[in-house]
Structure formats: C-alpha cells, structure tokens
Image: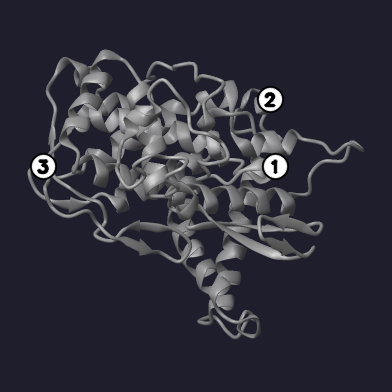
C-alpha cells in the first residue's frame, strides 16, 4: 500500500507540511527542530493514511501525540499495572484516548464508504475500506482502525527522529551540507539519498528489532531453542567494521554509486517482517530534506554532537537537533510560494524512485 506510484502521489502532501511548518521558524536564532519534524511527519502520515482534512485532521493532530506517550508508559509498566485503574492510570488514559480515536476513525470510515469518488482516492483508509479477504468479506472496521493506528504511531516518530538527526549531523559537516545544497539546486538526489542512508546507519532511531525462533537454530557457537525471543541490536550491526570500514565516521560517500547491503543495513528490520512503511519513510525523509535545503540555509556549528536521548520507544537528539537558519533568496527557492503551498496548489515534480534502492524496495 505504501510504495510505488501510489506512494509518490503523497509527495505534495509532505512538501505542504514542510512549507507550513518552516514558515514559523525564526532566523538567526538557535532553536530545536525536533518538535517541528514531529509535526511535519505526523501531519504527512495522517493525511496520507486517513485522507483527513479540516476538523478531523486537527483533532487527530492533537490526539495522536498523547496516545503515543501513554502507550509507551503502558508497555513499560508490569502486566498487573496495565489494567484500567481509573482515568489517571496509564491504562485508563490509554483507553480514554483510544475510544476518542476510534470515534474519529469510525466517522472517517463512514464518510469513505459514502464517498462516490472512493475508488479514485489514494489514502490508506480508502484502500482498506475497499479491500476484501479471500472469501470476499470486507475488513471489519475495528481491524481497519487498528491497522491505521499502528501505521501512524510507528511511522511518524521514527521518521521525525531520523530527519532531526540529519539536521544535527549536517550542521557538523559543512562541506557535505554545501554539496547537498548544490545538488538540490541542480535537481539531483544521489548524495541526498546516500546521506539519508548514512544518518540511519550511524543514528538509528530504534536500538533493536525483536524476533522469535520457530525452530531450534545454531548461531555460530550458540544453539538457540525454538520459541525463544531474540533482540537484534541494530546499532551493533551498523557499527561493524567488516560491513562498514571506518564505521565510526559519518561518510555518505560510502553509498554513492552503491547501495547498502540488506543484511548489514537494517534500520527498518529485515526479511518478511521488514517495516511495511519503509518506502514511505524514505520518500518522506527525501522530500523533507530536499525542501529544507531548497528553502533554508543551515548555519554550521563546531559544537559537540548531540547525545542520544531515549523517548520511550525511539532515540532522538538530546538537545532537540538545534539549528540556526536563514531563508534563501536564490532562484532555486523562488518557485515554492508558501501561500500556494498552504492553499494546496503547489505540486512539486515527482521523481521515479529506483527500484533497487533499499528505501524503495517492494514491501
């Protein structure tokens, strides 16, 4: 659902969200970019997944962040404390938010079923409403709500964290920042894609990915029984000198003219359980960085790199990926009128993604 031609139709949504957010950014003053990246990613995925606009979109923008926060608390507490112990308990708050979320989704599903142009829509909700099981039965509304909530929760914080890390890294690599700006002005994308891959390698927002053995297996000197839970360390895999020479360095050029090896580069996991939203996330990061570099000049810094901070499910720059920006007045940015973007009239050019890139592989 989130790849190919349909996914590329979401590009204008992402650029609109970026333009709307950066219109409020201060110039020549340091500020945190992570909150903005979170709002951009949330707005983009809500519109792509739900097709929501107007009051429904505004309410979802307000509702999803506390759902994520409370869900993280519920997962961390012992099982006995996951019961509803009142409106202020983590489980009680989660249930209250979930009921409100389900009510909004029920309304959107009903609107979608009544929409005479349903078959022309590209949002995920419209696709799920039209989908059928092998026996011809439609997907129950509650299952649709579960799928949509999973996509939104899993998709927006991870992407926001990766883009924030990109800002944090680029400000500390001014030569790379200059090359990327020149590439954007020339209409290229190879170095930008390589930078996205290297950000995800060196600053993965997820520390590990879980798996469960179906049968007894041997892993070098270890024999692991069946039905055993395992957690693979993404950071350890990405720090391998065997896979990535000089692994501690931030060097996107390692991917220019090449692609990461799927067994060594696993920010989205791997195998049949690879993140279903990987292609969408890659496209979103690419469009966001392209728009930021086209519209803004980021002031480099020699400050130490920001530490990792755990946010309950993901890691992000501890100081919020702080930046200082100036608006560009070059011809490269003059075509993107913030007013037309806010009105939904701006449609950036769509570039066909290469089929063999990890970020765009079929899901």
* The one of 333 and 111 positioned closer to us in this rendering: 333
Question: Which-is-in-front pick, marks 1 and 3?
Answer: 1
Mark before the other along the chain sequence, 3 or 2? 3
CA distance separating discs 1 and 2: 29 Å
- First in sequence: mark 1 vs mark 3: 3
- Judging by the rendered image, the residue that carries numbered circle 1 is 272
Q: Are there few (<14), some (14-19), or many (20+) residues within 10 Å of tag 3? A: some
Question: Seen in the image, is 243 located left or right of residue 35?
Answer: right
Return the mark for residue 8. Answer: none
Q: Which residue is mark 3?
A: 27
**Disc number for residue 119:** 2
Q: Looking at the image, is 61 positioned above or below residue 363?
A: below
Q: Where in the figure is residue 333, as x and y percent of width and height? A: 21, 21
Residue drawn at the location 56% of the way across and 36% of the way down: 262
In the rendered image of this protein, does residue 301 appear above or below residue 332? below
Please determine whether, in this image, residue 196 is positioned above or below residue 92: above
Which residue in the rendered view is the most extreme toward the right? 135
Q: Is residue 357 visible?
A: yes
Q: Nearer the viewer, residue 40 or 75?
A: 75
Q: Quadrant of residue 133?
A: top right
What x and y, as percent, mark residue 59? 47, 53
Mark 3 or mark 2, which is nearer to you?
A: 3
């Amino acid at each position: 659902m989130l790849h190919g031609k349909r996914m590329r139709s979401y590009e204008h949504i992402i650029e609109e969200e970026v333009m709307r957010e950066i219109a409020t950014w201060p110039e020549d003053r340091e500020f945190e970019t992570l909150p903005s990246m979170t709002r951009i990613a949330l707005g983009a995925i809500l519109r792509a997944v739900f097709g929501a606009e107007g009051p429904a979109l505004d309410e979802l923008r307000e509702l999803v962040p506390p759902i994520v926060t409370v869900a993280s608390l519920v997962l961390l507490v012992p099982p006995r404390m996951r019961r509803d112990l009142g409106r202020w308990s983590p489980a009680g708050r989660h249930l209250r938010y979930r009921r409100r979320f389900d009510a909004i989704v029920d309304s959107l599903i009903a609107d979608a079923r009544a929409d005479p142009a349903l078959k022309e829509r590209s949002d995920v909700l419209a696709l799920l409403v039209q989908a059928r099981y092998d026996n011809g039965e439609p997907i129950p509304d509650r299952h649709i709500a579960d799928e949509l909530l999973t996509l939104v929760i899993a998709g927006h914080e991870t992407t926001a964290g990766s883009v924030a890390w990109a800002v944090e890294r680029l400000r500390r690599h001014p030569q790379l920042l200059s090359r990327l700006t020149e590439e954007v002005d020339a209409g290229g994308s190879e170095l930008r894609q390589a930078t996205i891959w290297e950000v995800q390698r060196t600053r993965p927002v997820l520390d590990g990915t879980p798996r469960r053995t179906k049968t007894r297996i041997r892993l070098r000197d270890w024999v692991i029984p069946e039905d055993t839970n395992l957690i693979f360390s993404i950071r350890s895999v990405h720090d391998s000198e065997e896979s990535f020479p000089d692994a501690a360095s931030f060097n996107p050029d390692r991917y220019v003219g090449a692609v990461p090896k799927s067994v060594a580069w696993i920010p989205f996991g791997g195998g049949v359980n690879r993140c279903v939203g990987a292609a969408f996330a890659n496209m979103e990061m690419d469009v966001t960085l392209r728009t930021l570099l086209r519209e803004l000049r980021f002031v480099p810094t020699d400050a130490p790199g920001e530490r990792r901070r755990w946010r309950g499910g993901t890691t992000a720059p501890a100081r919020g990926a702080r930046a200082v920006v100036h608006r560009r007045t070059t011809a490269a940015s003059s075509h993107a009128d913030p007013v037309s973007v806010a009105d939904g009239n701006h449609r950036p050019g769509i570039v066909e993604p290469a089929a063999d890139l990890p970020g765009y592989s079929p899901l």
